[in-house]
Amino acid sequence: MVHDKPQTHSPARFGWISSALACMQNALGLNQDRCLHCLRPFSPVFAVHPQDAPAPESLLCPRCSALLAQYAGPRCPRCGIPPSDPQAGNSICGACLQNPPPWSGSAFYGLYQGALRHTLLRLKFDGHLYLAPLLGNFLLESVSCLPRPDVIVAVPQHPAHLRRRGYNQAHELARTLHGLSGLPLSSRLLTRPVPGQEQAHLGAKDRRSNVRHSFAASPEARGLRVWIVDDVMTTGSTMNAAASALLAGGAARVDAVFAARTPLNTAAEISDIPSHAG
C-alpha cells in the first residue's frame, strides 16, 4: 500500500499568508484603531509576526506620526535650547557658558509646540495616562546620546500636590522608560519635602526661587549615575534644583532627560496652562 508523503509548509508561506490576510482586513476596515493623538480611526501597521506586540508609534495615524516626529535640528548640548541662528549648530548657548547647569548631559525628544505640546498637556492636566507609553517610547529614542545610568528617577512632586492631582506625569514617563529600557527606577533617591507654587503660573525669575531648596536626595544616591526624567524643560529651574540636590547628596553624575524643550528660554514666552485648565 502506497502512503502519500506528508506535505510541509515553509515559514515563508505562512508569513505571506499572514501578511495577505492583514492587508485584506485593513482594506475592509476590520483592523481599524483610533489614533492616540487625533482620535480618528485608522488602520495600524502590524508586524509580520502577529505575536509581536505593536510599538506605541503604531497607535498613531500616518499624519500624526509626521506631526510627532523627533526634533533633529541644532541645540545646545547642555540645556537643549535651539539656537536663534540655525547655522550655529550644536554649540553651547550663552546662558550655559555663563552659568553651566549642574547636569552633565541632556536628551529630549521634541520642541514644546504643536502636536507634542498638545499631547503633553493632555497627559499632565487631563489625566490621559494612556499617552505615557507613547511618550516614554519617544524618550527611549532620544537617550542614545547619553551614557547608561545606574538608576532613573523622576522629578518628584510634593506629597500634597501629588494627592491633589492623583499622579505625577514625570513618574509615569520614567516608569515607562524603565519598562522599555530595563534600567532600574527609584522613587526614594529624590524627594520634594518643601512645597512650592505650580511652576506654570510663574515667570523665569520666580521659577528659580520657587524650587531652589525644594528637593532632597537620599544617601543612597552616593556614587550613582542618575537620569532625572521630567515632561518639559522651560527655564531649567526645576531640573537645576533637582540635579543640584542629587549631586550634593553624592551622585557621581546626573543627566537630564525630558520629553520636550520650550523653543525659547523664558517661561513668559510659552504658557504651560491649557485654556481649559482654569
Image (spheres, rainbow, N blue to C red):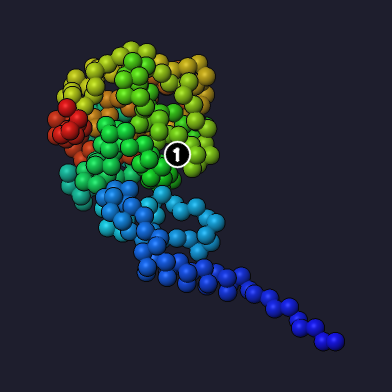
Q: Position of residue 179 (x, y in %)?
A: 50, 39
Is residue 106 visible in the rendered image? The answer is no
Residue lying at 45% horizontally and 60% vertically, measured from the top left? 46
Percent of width and height locating residue 260: 29, 39
Q: Nearer the viewer, residue 130 or 137?
A: 130
The amino acid type, in three-letter code, at marker 1 is Leu
Up-down relation of residue 56 to residue 30 (above or below): above
Question: How many numbered callouts?
Answer: 1
Residue drawn at point x = 82 percent, y = 87 percent:
2
Task: Locate residue 275, reporting x and y percent.
Answer: 15, 34
- Relative to 54, say whether 159 is above or below: above
Counting other residues with Cα less than 10 Å from the Cα at mark 1, is it few (<14), some (14-19), or many (20 or more)? many
Instruction: Judge from the rendering whether residue 52 lies leftward or rightward of residue 60; answer left or right.
Output: right
Determine the image quadrant of residue 164.
top left
Of the pair 217 and 225, the residue shown nearer to us: 217
Image spot of residue 174 (x, y percent): 42, 34
Question: Label 1 belongs to which residue?
Answer: 177
Left or right, 162 with respect to 253, comes to: left
Q: Residue at x 23, y 38 (%)?
A: 262
Note whether residue 3 is visible. yes
Return the residue found at the far top. Answer: 194
> Which residue is located at x 49 percent, y 42 percent?
180
The single residue placed furthest to the right in the displayed view is 1
**Which image quadrant: the N terminus?**
bottom right
Tell me the quarter of the image containing the C terminus: top left
